[in-house]
Image: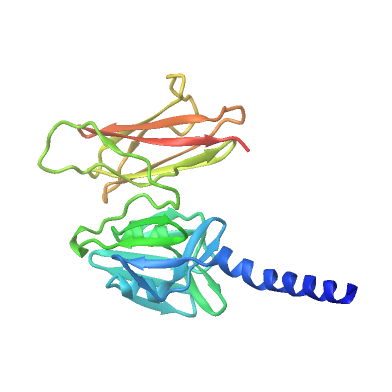
Amino acid sequence: MRKRILSIAMTVLLALAFTVPIFANEVRVQLDGEYVDIEAVIVNDRTLLPVRAITELLGGSVDWDGELRQVTLERGNTRILLTIDNPVAYVNGVALELDVPAQIINGWTKVPLRFIAASFGVDVDFANNTVLITTAPEEDTLPVVADEQPQSELISESAPSSETTLSIISAPNEVRRNQQVTISITGTPNTTYRLNVRMASGNLSTAQGLGDATTDANGVASWTWQIGGATNAQTIRAEISGGGESLRHEMQVIVD
């Protein structure tokens, strides 16, 4: 009788060992309302997909340089350059830092979905263990904020204009104490923009690295500063203005 109980117990444990990880890690991918056969993996809470499969499904092309271990993706007027295991990527020549770099897993090159989707102007959501991808027309693709977390709201406060040039191309939604933070924008070339960071109390941060920055010939500028070691958990707001335009971006301070 004892042997039978042990046998049953071992059978149950083996069943759990083989089934729980499969269901826990299974991530399905849905493109424009239809499921597609793509294997998604989660690395550091970021969703990674095979680079060729996702890029070609979105109507783009992929070029691989084995010597440099670099992959180039193109869709419409957007060109992305990624280097394996390198956290810095380039979108139309603009350097952006990734939370998780492109990497080779089980012989396949995997890339962070949120970053690829944001750069190609494609909407991504996540519900019920399913990645929901909604494509957009190629002519609308522009580099935007690349982060796996839901994007914070960008609020334009500029006066009515026939063309808006100011936008954020890289900014975190979550920051931590003692972390260096970088925000990059694109705006009117050779124009001075100001970045203020407003704390929840209403006071402005006095951290070094904030203030004025002038865009280069491509209209790109960035600021880098450090979150204070005594900063409390709160929502802080980046306020960017210049060239007759302004916008805001909220970030949540996480205290571990």
Q: Residue at x 45, y 44 (%)?
A: 172
Q: Residue at x 46, y 19 (%)?
A: 201
- The number of numbered badges drawn on the structure is 0
- Tell me how the rendering is colored: rainbow
Q: Position of residue 118 (x, y in %)?
A: 34, 56
Q: Position of residue 58 (x, y in %)?
A: 30, 70
Image quarter of the C terminus = top right
Image quarter of the N terminus = bottom right
Left or right of residue 185, residue 43 in this image: right
Left or right of residue 9, residue 106 in this image: left
Camera-side residue of 109 and 48: 48
Name which quarter of the figure residue 21 lies in.
bottom right
**Residue 114 is at least partly visible in this image:** yes
Camera-side residue of 103 and 218: 103
Q: Is 222 located above or below residue 104 in the figure?
A: above
Q: Position of residue 37 (x, y in %)?
A: 41, 76
Camera-side residue of 50 and 20: 20
Q: Residue at x 74, y 69 (%)?
A: 13
Name the residue furthest right.
2
Q: Is 147 located above or below residue 206 in the figure?
A: below
Left or right of residue 205, residue 121 in this image: left
Q: Is 156 located above or below residue 202 in the figure?
A: below
Q: Position of residue 235 (x, y in %)?
A: 46, 30
Q: Residue at x 49, y 74 (%)?
A: 109
Left or right of residue 76, residue 44 in this image: right
